């Protein structure tokens, strides 16, 4: 088995070159593009393809109930490394050409048993969001993450003020921030983003 790369410091909802460059300069090891049409952070595959990133920074695509063929097509267009699946996808729908991070909402009824045998590189745990897809911006009880049979990426309501606590309780492989480091949907606040990445890196490497 190949060893996993270093900690994941992910900035999601990237819609433009300026934000991508600022995230990478500040230490992001992954950037996320949202291909779900219902999201205010939606980006077309061709636009994502035009946003460059250096080797070693993972390019992650957010999908909701897309067919495997369409995910693989977009992955090729946008040079993705990871498909982050936020819908009701089962293993039959997982793409075969790139890694999968399966997103799951941690509600009172949530159970890791549903994902124990899923062929996913990691589980991305997000907070409850009702009928919303593609990320909630709400935190969950981070202590539950330690029960996971797979590597964990913590998402949902993270910023510089709470990421160290999330890492302390969840012991994740990585963290993912979006809405709380924005000035408006799809536009990052570069100061908040730098502060988040600095705090996250310190916590994950401690």
Image: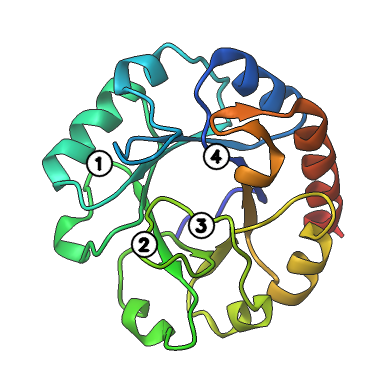
Q: Secondary structure at mark 1?
A: loop
Q: Residue at x 50, y 23 (%)?
A: 15
In the rendered structure, which disc, 4 or 3, sits on the residue that comes first in sequence?
A: 4
| Residue annotated with mark 3 | 136
Q: Earlier in the sequence, mark 2 or mark 1?
A: 1
Circle 4 sits on which residue? 12
- In this image, 83 relative to 56: left or right? left
Q: Marks 2 and 1, how far apart in space? A: 13 Å
Is label 3 or label 2 in front?
Answer: 3
Mark-to-mark CA distance, 1 and 4: 21 Å
Q: Which residue was labeled with disc 2?
A: 120
Which residue is found at the position 57% from the left and 31% from the top?
57
Q: Is residue 134 above or below residue 40?
A: below
Q: Are marks 1 and 3 in contact (CB under 8 Å)?
A: no
The residue to which callout 1 is attached is 97
Residue at the (58%, 55%) spot, across then down: 137
């Amino acid at each position: 088995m190949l060893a996993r790369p270093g900690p994941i410091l992910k900035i999601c909802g990237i819609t433009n070159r300026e934000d991508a460059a600022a995230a990478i300069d500040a230490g992001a090891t992954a950037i996320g593009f949202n291909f779900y049409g219902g999201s205010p952070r939606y980006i077309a595959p061709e636009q994502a393809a035009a946003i460059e990133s250096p080797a070693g920074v993972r390019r992650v695509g957010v999908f909701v109930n897309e067919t495997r063929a369409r995910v693989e097509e977009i992955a090729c267009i946008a040079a993705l490394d990871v498909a982050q699946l936020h819908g009701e996808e089962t293993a039959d729908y997982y793409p075969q050409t790139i890694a999968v991070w399966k997103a799951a909402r941690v509600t009172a009824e949530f159970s890791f048993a549903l994902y124990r045998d899923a062929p996913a590189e990691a589980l991305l745990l997000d907070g409850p969001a009702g009928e919303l897809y593609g990320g909630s911006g709400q935190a969950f009880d981070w202590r539950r993450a330690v029960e996971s049979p797979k590597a964990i990426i913590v998402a949902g309501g993270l910023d510089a003020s709470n990421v160290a606590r999330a890492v302390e309780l969840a012991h994740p492989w990585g963290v993912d921030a979006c809405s709380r480091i924005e000035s408006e949907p799809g536009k990052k606040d570069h100061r908040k983003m730098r502060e988040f990445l600095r705090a996250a890196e310190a916590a994950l490497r401690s």
